[in-house]
Amino acid sequence: MIHFSCDRCKRMIDAGAEPRFVVRIEIDAVLEPTATDQADEDRDYLKEIDEALEAMDLDEEFCDREEPLRRTYDLCEECYQRFLRDPLSVETTMHFGFSHN
């Protein structure tokens, strides 16, 4: 018998008694073309792209990939509901409040 556990809270999921939610995430590196004019003819676009990628500090493994990066996660119902409310964990990220001394 296959056993499932929630990839977020690590709780065991009883597939016969409760739903298991599968979340699939696909990530593509996309560089959008910009509008060009005559003044842009002398620009070194490859150098600009290289500098932009270095500034973003992307994982080299991901940048070398031609196909998208795909991940699959199993979630229990509670974690699935949390994921729906805040898929990027923006609200659940811990914010520190410092005094203005």
Image (cartoon, rainbow, N blue to C red):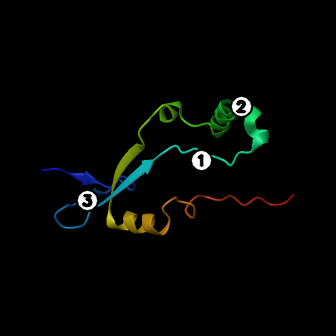
Q: Identify the residue position indicated by label 3 in the image.
A: 13
Image height of 7 relative to 46, above or below: below
- Whether residue 32 is situated above or below residue 76 in the rendered picture: above
Residue holding disc 2: 44
- The percent position of residue 8, horizontal first and vertical second, equals 40, 55
Q: Nearer the viewer, residue 40 or 56?
A: 40
Image quadrant in which you'd find residue 14: bottom left
Q: Amino acid at mark 3?
A: Ile
> In the image, is 89 to the left or to the right of 17?
right
Number of numbered discs on residues: 3
Residue type pointed to by label 1: Glu
Q: Residue at x 80, y 60 (%)?
A: 99
- The furthest residue to the left: 1
Residue 66 picture quarter: top left
Q: What is the spatial separation of the Cα atoms under label 3 and label 1, in whole angstroms?
A: 41 Å
Check disc 2 and report its element: helix, strand or loop: loop
Q: Which mark is residue 32?
A: 1
Q: Position of residue 46 (x, y in %)?
A: 65, 31
Q: Amino acid at mark 2?
A: Asp
From mark 2 to mark 3, how far is it between C-alphas? 53 Å
